[in-house]
Amino acid sequence: MALGIGKKPQATTAQIEWFLVWFTAMFFWWIAINTFHLIDTSQNYAFGLVFGLIPLVGGVLGLRNAIRWGGEKSVMGRATGLLSLGLVSWSIGGLIWAYYNFFCAVYVPYPSLADAAYVISWPLWAAGAIQLSRATGARFSLRSLKGKLLLITIPVLVSIVSYYLLITVARGGELDLSSGIVKVFFDLAYPIGDVVILSFALLIYGLSFKYLGGRYRYAILMLVTGFVLNYFADFAFSWTTTTETFYVAGWVDLLFMAAMTALSIGVVGLNPFVREE
């Protein structure tokens, strides 16, 4: 994506590069933790705390973009703002989780107050995706035959995959309430929320790829990538907590970190000063 000349587009490029450097450094830290088996130590809990700051920074930068779009006065402002608030909410959940790790000696606080913050991000992201569909003209594309086919097939396919992973793979074909109603609720709420958001995101990308000459197609692609990664990360989290194999800084957290990095880059890329040359 070519960016226009000027301080603000250049700043956007620098911010994206900074997130990539942050992710790379965290990735090597993750390798070290898992290579030397630094499990149940301050190392992996510190990792969880630091990677949880990625969406906080991304959300704050995204909110600045939302203000540049005109805030609530513009559809893109509302879309960028809601998506960014979802990142901030998710990060708050991560900070609460880290508090349990460091100060309460609870190493897998699930379900807990952290989930209240995590769950809030879902309606924010869904609302942001809806606003983004309005901004990109995806709702008008739904009137075409292609749009109608995508509207039917994408949610159906995502739901089938979700049911298979959630019920068949993770729970052996049945819901076991012995783990507690609250845990089962969140085990179902996360993936169901992911189905809604992922369906919206895929529809938006499939129907609005050429939005404004394609200047935001990479930002939207990063948002879609982030929601796809988060979709699988949530399933992996539900599965590993059910099988009692989850640990902080494990492969599931690597998925979450990749998802939050992609979403952060996506909202940073929704900069009104970006133009394609």
Image (spheres, helix red, strand yellow):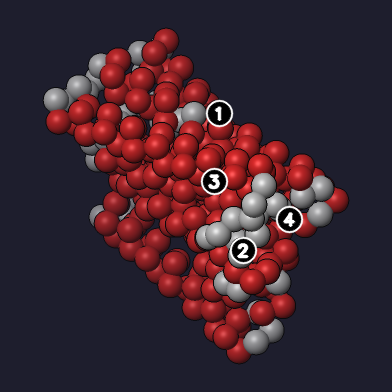
Q: Where 233 falls versus 91 (above or below)?
A: below
- Residue 240 x %, y %: 28, 41
The three-letter code of the residue at mark 2 reads: Glu
In space, the residues marked 2 and 3 are separated at their CA atoms by 13 Å
Q: Which residue is mark 1?
A: 92
Q: Are marks 1 and 4 in contact (CB under 8 Å)?
A: no
Q: Is residue 273 left or right of residue 246?
A: right
Which of the two labelled residues, at mark 3 and mark 1, occupies the earlier sequence position? 3
Give residue 218's mark: none
Label 3 residue SS = helix
Q: Which residue is mark 3?
A: 13
Give, as a three-letter code, the residue at label 1.
Answer: Ile
- Nearer mark to the viewer, of 1 and 2: 2
Q: Are marks 3 and 1 in contact (CB under 8 Å)?
A: no
Residue 192 x, y percent position in the rendering: 50, 55
Say which of 241 and 256 sits in front: 256
Q: Is residue 251 above or below residue 2?
A: above
Residue at x 42% of width, y 25% of height: 50
Residue 76's disc is 4
Upstream in sequence: badge 2 or badge 3 = 3
